[in-house]
Amino acid sequence: MITSPDGRDLISNQNANFDEALIKGITRAHKWQEMIDSGKARSIRDVAEREGVPSGYACKIIRLTELAPDITTAIINGRQPQSLQLASMMDDFPILWADQRQHFGF
């Protein structure tokens, strides 16, 4: 659960908003990271070649594995801020989870 400083639940009051692109991006990121971790792929470049995507795109997508777990859960459950889109997550974002929440509007 993500709460405001005054203790209000910021997520459950929203209607579910499943964003297929966001969910696909997070799913791909974790799949690709697993390919590297398991040795099925040697590098992000190798993943990109196997998946038929540009290596720059693969690099940006795989960073989604660094999202705070509650942000990932909110996206999978369709509870992310309405304004959050995959394109905005492809840019650099903070590594600290608290900073991510603020950056992405959680």
Image: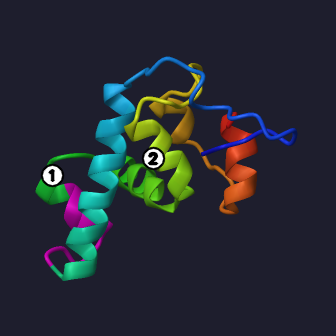
Q: Amino acid at mark 2?
A: Thr
**Numbered range of the magenta stretch:** 40-48
Residue drawn at x 69%, y 46% is 101
Question: Among all residues in the image, which is located at the extreme bottom?
Answer: 39
**First-in-chain label (1 vs 2):** 1
Amino acid identity at mark 1: Glu
From this view, report whether residue 69 is shown above or below residue 5: below
Tag shown at residue 51: 1
Query: Which residue shows up at 29% across the image and 38% down it?
Result: 24
The quadrant where residue 20 appears: top left
Q: Is residue 69 above or below residue 105?
A: below
Q: Is residue 47 magenta?
A: yes
Task: From the viewer's perspective, tell me whether residue 60 is left or right of residue 70.
Answer: left
Label 2 residue SS: helix
User: Where is residue 77 drawn, in percent x and y?
Assistant: 40, 35
Provide residue 35's location: percent of width, then percent of height: 20, 70
Q: Give the residue at mark 2.
A: 73
Query: Quadrant of the image for the N terminus?
Result: top right
Query: Which quadrant would the C terminus be assigned to in this image?
Result: top right
Q: Is residue 54 left or right of residue 64?
A: left
Disc 1: CA contacts within 10 A as few (<14), some (14-19) or many (>=20)? few
